[in-house]
Amino acid sequence: MGCSSSLLKKQKVIDPIQASEQEARILSKLRELGLQFDGMGSNTELELIRQTFLSLQEIDQNRKNVWLQALYNDILAPLYFSKFDNFKYNSSNPFVPNQNLLCQLRNKDFDTIIKPKDELRECLLNIFWDHMNIFNIDLVKMQRFIMAVCENYQDNPFHSFYHAFSVCQMIFTISEKNNQFGRFLLPMENFALFLSGLGHDLNHPGVTNVFMINSRHPLAVRYNDISVLENHHAATLIHFLELPGCDILNSMSSEDQTHMRKIIIPTVLATDMAKHNFVMEHFISCMREFNKDKGEHRQSFLDIVLHACDVGNPVMKFELATVWSLKIIQEFNEQVWKEEQKSIPVSEFMRIGSDINKIKRNQIGFIDMFIHPLWMLLGNHVEGIEEYLESIENNRRSWEKIESL
């Protein structure tokens, strides 16, 4: 990305009003980075990115668009990290768990979607409170980590911070019914499960692995077309856990930190729907003679719990499950449009539109093929799953009866 000195002299900042939408996003990110880099040493990296961006004005529009997309997708978007230090809780204002809120969070039908993000971040402090005590997690670092995670979820219809929170909260509801999964996991691994739930879709672009591969996205090249998004999510989560001021695992020994990393990565990778059958079959095999002393058995339990919660919208009451269903269908429809615009193979099974009959078939088929068998299997070994299965069956009947939305 070198820029000659003569070229740099000719550059001038673009008027944001005249900039394209994509250019405006880049300029916005550069301003954020400028704030972040204050007091953090050399601004060389920032200047290099800025001058590279400015030099794009000398390039024809097609090449310019390619570079702008690469800058936004593969360099800037996954690297946002808030330096905001004025957090609500600190040594002079310690955090105290809200028992009434914790009671609400134990309900599988907690209505995530209507809450503002600041309330959800407060909820996460309550959810993680026991882990923070057990592992001596710094309160300010935990708030900063939660903020960084929140800000690195894109505003997709479905794969957003709201989905991440919903998955983490669903893990919490089941964990609370099962004594923090003490029969199946070590305390550290239970903590890793919650972190994996919160970060399992970090920086999700709102499209599938197939789209990433067919469009030859840089991330698909980086990960050799294998679990592209899941590798990206896991790597981004680990990156945040190691950032200064965000390193909530720093109180652990280096061996324990390494163990957490080795647990989190495969757990997040198990959320790839392409691994659905393997996750179920491996769990069945391990549960024939489950041995908590075997790391493979504990990992299998981690995998299936996160996978089940990741696709767990149908275990909610129909009013909530329907909203989540329509959000994923909206994301599907948007991907089909993007595939047509890029002239790459179109995922026809995702072309659902607003036809109620197509929506019904999609949801009933998903429940029959994936959700009901998965949660039945989990319910064979985990306590308190009966009401989740009842909701799945009620939702299937409701989809059959529904005539309009």
Image (cartoon, rainbow, N blue to C red):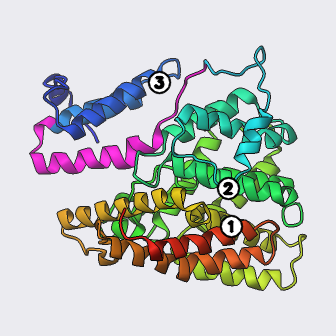
Residue type highlighted by circle 3: Phe
Q: Residues within 10 Å of mark 2 (few under 14, many from 20)?
A: many
Q: Which residue is mark 2?
A: 108
Q: Magenta region: which residues?
A: 57-85
SS at mark 3?
A: helix
**Quick one: SS at disc 2?**
loop
Location of residue 349 by image quarter? bottom left
Of badges 3 and 1, the one in the foreground is 1
Q: Amino acid at mark 1?
A: Tyr
Question: Visible in this render: residue 21?
Answer: yes
Residue bearing the label numbered 1: 388
Q: Looking at the image, tell me whether mark 2 or mark 3 is earlier in sequence order.
A: 3
Determine whether 117 is above or below 236 in the image: above
Q: Nearer the viewer, mark 2 or mark 3?
A: 2
Where residue 359 appears, as percent x and y from the top left, is 38, 71
Q: Is residue 244 visible?
A: no
Q: Residue at x 59, y 51 (%)?
A: 166
What label does residue 37 carry, if any? 3
